[in-house]
Image: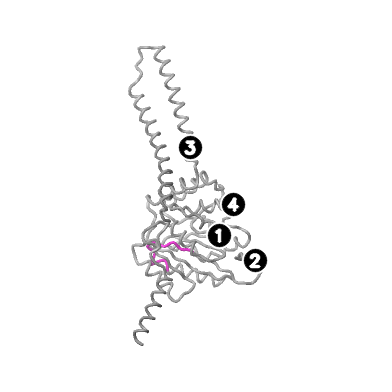
Amino acid sequence: MESINSNDNQMKLVSFVLPCYCSEKTLPGVVAEIDAAMERLPYRHEIIMVNDCSKDGTWQTIRDLCRDHAQRFGITFARNFGQHAALMAGIRAAKGDVVVCLDDDGQTPADEVGKLLSAVKDGADVCYARYEHKQHSSFRNFGSFVNEKMAQWLLEKPKDLYLSSYFAMRRFVADEVCRYNNSYAYLPGLVLRSTKNIVNVDVNHRARKIGQSGYSFKKLLNLWLNGFTSFSVKPLRLATMLGAIFAGAGFLYGIYTIIKKLVNPDVPVGFSAMMCAIIFFGGMLMLMVGMVGEYVGRTFISSNSAPQFVIRDTTANLEIHRTEAGIIDAEQKN
């Protein structure tokens, strides 16, 4: 497939992927903004919306948005699989030379997509939007901070590279991302292991006008665990190193206790100190065993072919159903 920076005048296709969760009120505005932005750019585009089993009328909204629009496509999950699973489903369905992922809440400025596409056209494999002033809550900002530090340590992300949910990537990077079939998808890890030619562009981040973030502490914790256990063995190496340090410290403390007892037999060994040491080392041991168990458990689940996502229906299937129903009605009338 031709790349976006070829020299001919053919219009290239840009695929927009929107993971959707409880966004029936914000999604139409995001789609309209994408269409308006792409009218000013020399590229064709398609919009893929993935409903992550929303509790409101998001799927009906997606169906309405896709009706009579060939460049729009909707997917709905059978249950909630999370934002990154929805992104994976959308990327697999995307056909564009460039794939752009953004949020469904309107906080990521779709009208500035030209900046991301320009960076890709200039040679970048992936371009992430960078926000000077984020309009998220303190909880979300803390989650982003932890995610950044984790990516630096575990995934060897460059310190000056900012990762966000608004990014554009070339077709070959999207194809490499789609090669990942395990159930615990983590997009930054998949992108960072595919290419190092990644840049940032500055865009404005908007305040949320409707609703609230779908990320709870539980979902953020699961996301961090995906990053910890799916793309690096450094936590296991850290556990080994800490185990060696604590074992050495315990051995030295035991020698110190024996010498202390020999020098001054009347000094009690200290029941409280011993119990503190037992509780501390026991807790560290359980933590390390739990970390190993997390790796083993996720490997076991992946070996059982647990799905990344399960698609209940798509707007393409709905069109087929309507067509078949129309044919049946026509036959009955004749």
Query: Residue 238, labelled with which disc?
Result: 3
For this rendering, which residue is in front, 225 or 321? 321
**Residue assigned mark 4:** 196
Q: State the scheme by which the image is colored.
A: one colour
Type of residue at label 3? Leu
Q: Which residues are magenta?
A: 17-27
Task: Decide whether residue 22 is among the magenta residues.
Answer: yes
Q: Could you tell me how far apart the alpha carbons at marks 3 and 4 are, in whole angstroms?
A: 25 Å
Whole-Å distance between the Cαs marked 1 and 4?
A: 12 Å
Q: Residues within 10 Å of mark 3 (few under 14, many from 20)?
A: few
Circle 1 SS class: strand
Dot 1: within a 10 Å radius of its alpha carbon, few (fewer than 14), some, or many (20 or more) residues?
many
Mark 4 or 2, nearer chain start:
2
In the image, taking residue 3 as reference, residue 95 lies left or right, namely: left
Q: Earlier in the sequence, mark 1 or mark 4?
A: 1
The disc, 3 or 4, on the residue closer to the chain's N-terminal end is 4
In this figure, which residue is indicated by the disc labeled 1? 169
Mark 3 touching mark 4, by CB under 8 A? no
Q: Quadrant location of the C terminus? A: bottom left
**In the rendered image, which residue does mark 2 sit on?**
6
Mark 1 / mark 3, whichever is N-terminal? 1
Which residue is pictured at 60% across the width and 54% down the height? Answer: 197
Q: Amino acid at mark 1?
A: Met
Residue 11 percent location from the top left of the image: 59, 71
Question: How far across and how far down the image is residue 16, in percent?
Answer: 50, 65
Q: Which of disc 2 and disc 3 is earlier in sequence?
A: 2
In this picture, is 49 found above or below 145?
below
Q: What is the three-letter code of the residue carrying label 4?
A: Lys
Marks 1 and 2 sit apart, C-alpha to C-alpha, by 16 Å
Identify the image quadrant of the N terminus.
bottom right
